[in-house]
Amino acid sequence: MDKIKEGSQAYKAAGVDTAEGQRAVELMKKHVKETLNENVLTGLGSFGGIFKLPCEGMKEPVLVSGTDGVGTKLKLAFMMDRHDTIGIDAVAMCVNDVLCQGAEPLFFLDYIATGKVTGEKIADIVSGVAEGCKQGNMALIGGETAEMPGFYGDGEYDIAGFAVGIADRDDIITGADIGEGHVIVGLASSGFHSNGYSLIRRVFLDEMGMGVDDEIRELGETLGEALIRPTKIYARQCEAVKGVCRPDGIVHITGGGFYENIPRVLPEGIGVKIHKGTWEVPPVFELIKNCGGLTEDDMFKTFNMGIGMMFFVKEEYGEKVRKAVEATGEKAYIIGKTVACGEGEKVEICG
């Protein structure tokens, strides 16, 4: 026992406090517990999370997975010392991708790495992860908190996640069935979500000299409040749309904006025409465009422009899908259509 104690003290002297790590686990337990359901067969602290697959009624169940991080949006969390929403972003970036394939979210695992574990800060981060899991209707069944002194700066950390969902193979959404004349229903974003933050920081903080506590008249809030707002999770909206029809394609608008993400679901010979003015663009996008001297092309190639997810459906379902989404409390707009196209650019932004 003495050797164990000596080893613990030696490890602490090297910068790793295992006791604080255990305290962080105790603080996060209540948040994790709120996400668990009858399919979770292990508790917090097991070597591996075990989840019973709900396959009833499925002919050929398949698992759909996604992994992602939050990127340099973390810098805002550090500046504001605000850590209770960044976990929502981590979940959203993963689960929204899983939803695009038509899967039902099942469970999530997180990975947090930091230079020094502080129980309350880790618990705040995990509280956001748990909130994201609740919004995504999934269980948080495991994770890892790695203390890495000398690797991360004082107060810094990184977070990544891994989401798993399930779908019947015949129900997987790939975009292969999208044809000419499909309607595109766009779902409102909450702002920048979790993409473009290297450019955002350069424009607002470096070039314009703004601070996160500055009140911005055009936004009606501080810059920090506008930038830290978490990514929306569209699980309820996807479930509502399934009650109307099976979308032929779903797109999560992340890094690369419209031009990179929309073509990921389009078959050969099919493009899209997106009509500006058919949806509300949050004022923060106009602000960065003006402050940074960005072109419209820059904007649509970098940001979501106020549309976080898109459903591609046959024209007769367009208005029904829009209303089904709005019945969940989310804003939705018919923003364009699919068209026949040749080689070259598949996305056209029209006036």
Image: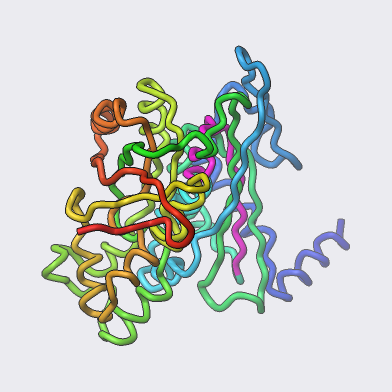
Give the farthest residue toward the top. Answer: 57
Total numbered badges shown on the rendered structure: 0
Residue 306 drawn above or below residue 206: above
Q: Nearer the viewer, residue 218 or 183?
A: 183
111 in the magenta segment: yes
> Residue 191 placed where, x, y %?
30, 57
Q: Nearer the viewer, residue 251 or 237?
A: 251
Quadrant for the N terminus in the image: bottom right
Q: Residue at x 58, y 56 (%)?
A: 160
**Quadrant hosting residue 139:** top right
Q: Is residue 211 left or right of residue 237?
A: left
Q: Nearer the viewer, residue 281 or 200?
A: 281
Quadrant for the C terminus in the image: bottom left
**Quadrant hosting residue 113:** bottom right
**Quadrant hosting residue 214:** bottom left
Q: Nearer the viewer, residue 102 or 131?
A: 102
Q: Is residue 10 visible?
A: yes
> Residue 257 placed where, x, y %?
40, 60
Q: Residue at x 37, y 81 (%)?
A: 202
Give the farthest residue toward the left. Answer: 217
Q: Residue at x 44, y 40 (%)?
A: 250
275 in the magenta segment: no
How was this image coloured? rainbow
Residue 104 drawn above or below residue 290: above
Residue 299 drawn above or below residue 185: below
Q: Is residue 306 left or right of residue 178?
A: left
Q: Residue at x 35, y 73 (%)?
A: 200
Q: Is residue 30 visible?
A: no
Give the residues in magenta: 95-114
> Residue 328 placed where, x, y %?
28, 30
